[in-house]
Amino acid sequence: MHDDTKLLRSYAEEGSESAFSELVSRHIDLVYSAAMRQVAGDTHLAQDVTQMVFADLARKARTLPRRAVLTGWLYQATRYAASKVVRAERRRSNREREAVAMHQPSTGTEPNWDQLGPVLDEAMGRLGAKDRDAVLLRYFERKDLRAVGGALGLSEEAARKRVGRALERLRRYLTGRGVTLSAATLATALTGSAVQSAPAALAATISAAVFAGAAAAATGSTFNLLNLMSMTKLKAGLLGAAVVVGAGTPVVVQQQSLSRLRAENRELREQSLQLEQLRAEHQQLVAHRTDADELDRLRKEVAELHRLRAEVAQLRRDKEDAVQLAAQNTQLKAALAKLTTFAKKKPEIQTAEQELLPLVQFEDARLTDAILTLARQAANLNLVFDPEVEPLLDRSLSIRLENVTAAAALEAILSTNNLRLVKTPGTTWKRREDVGEFPGDVVGITLK
């Protein structure tokens, strides 16, 4: 859009014909298409309106604001010029409205264009200048959002929001006029059908007519440029023939150059559409990558949660084990106190008075090992076991006793585990294979 400003300044200040021709070539499709809609599809009237607009641009080139969006100015100028022509040709409006369908190229993309076309420009006129410029640049001239933002002085994201709001306002107004479209359908219709290709020779005719008018004004001729631009089909044809005869070969060369530029322009538009698709795909990939990172983070948090829950469960089990050990220790102490109190009621073992052991302690020891150790310390007893107690002997035992005899400690452990000593073992009772014989008596251990 800055290129449009430079070209317009070049024409206004230096009279550069090539600069003005480039402006005509750039914007003639937009002006011609808007004129076509507003004159109900009459191609001759549309050409007259197009000539009037560019003639007006040539006259006002010096006075246009430097920051004006040329696309928006041309669109508004087309509306004003077309309204004058329509008022003058109102009696032929019905026939011209029918001609829209005959001259409008079929894109096969929008079945509602017959309803949308007649009210589109009125709806565009209801938009504010900034919104209208945004819609024109994005959908009529098919510019990407970065170019729209550059023309409007906005960032690409701000341009995206501006275009979205403007399109929604346009859609709401059209709905009020009985044309109900979704935002996506409206965008597709504008992109595919809002701008048509002007006749191939029209751009060259307009440029030549403007330059001829400028030359006539420079030599002091009384020829009126505005009248020249608003001639009928016959006058325009005669002027075009005169220009072609006078210009000769350069006009043919210019026409070939314009055709080549239009082909390049179409290729660039196709590449722009492909670029938009690639950008959309890139944004989707970025979103998927973000989702994957978030999923990985959540998985790690869930794994950490499971680990903490396992630690809490283990701590609870340890606490329960500690409580059980404390209760067992309390029972053993109580049994020892009871045995001490009722020492006269001791069972079968009759031993000499033994010395007190300052500490008797077992940590996770097998019950069998504890019993055998204390029996040997008490009186070198040889133990045989009732087969019924065999399943109990592999239990683990943790106990701590202070200032007791080995016999008392043995009685306490047996009593706590529901066992007792008998002097006369059964004939089927056996000694453990891994225990040797001692010089003491043979006694048995059975259930209470």
Image (tube, helix red, strand yellow):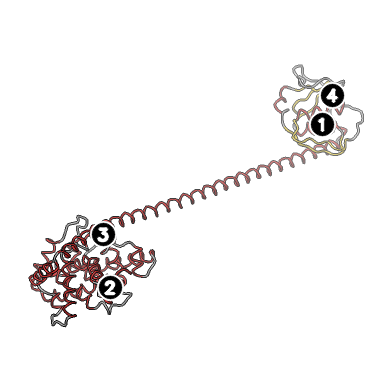
Is residue 419 placed above or below 238 in the rendered structure?
Answer: above
Q: Is residue 359 left or right of residue 72?
A: right
Q: Residue 269, position in %: x, y?
A: 28, 58
Kindly indicate whether the residue at mark 2 contacts the one at mark 1 (C-beta within 8 angstroms).
Answer: no
In front here: 387 or 394?
394
The answer for how far apart the CA atoms under marks 2 and 4 are is 123 Å
The answer for how far apart the CA atoms under marks 1 and 3 are is 106 Å
Q: Residue 285, position in %: x, y?
A: 41, 51
Kindly indicate whether the residue at mark 3 contacts the one at mark 4 (C-beta within 8 angstroms).
Answer: no
**Residue located beneath label 1 in the image:** 410
Q: Is residue 175 visible?
A: no
The answer for how far apart the CA atoms under marks 1 and 2 are is 115 Å
Amino acid on which disc 2 is placed: Leu
**Residue located beneath label 3 in the image:** 265
Q: Residues within 10 Å of mark 2 (few under 14, many from 20)?
A: many
**Residue located beneath label 2 in the image:** 8
Earlier in the chain: of badge 1 and badge 2, it is 2
Q: Quadrant of residue 348?
A: top right
Earlier in the chain: of badge 2 and badge 4, it is 2
Looking at the figure, which quarter contains the C terminus? top right
Is residue 255 placed above or below 330 in the rendered structure?
Answer: below
> Mark 4 or 3, which is nearer the eye?
3
Number of the label disc, if any, that sits on residue 381: 4
Label 4 sits on a secondary structure element that is loop
Q: Is residue 353 left or right of residue 323?
A: right
Earlier in the chain: of badge 1 and badge 3, it is 3
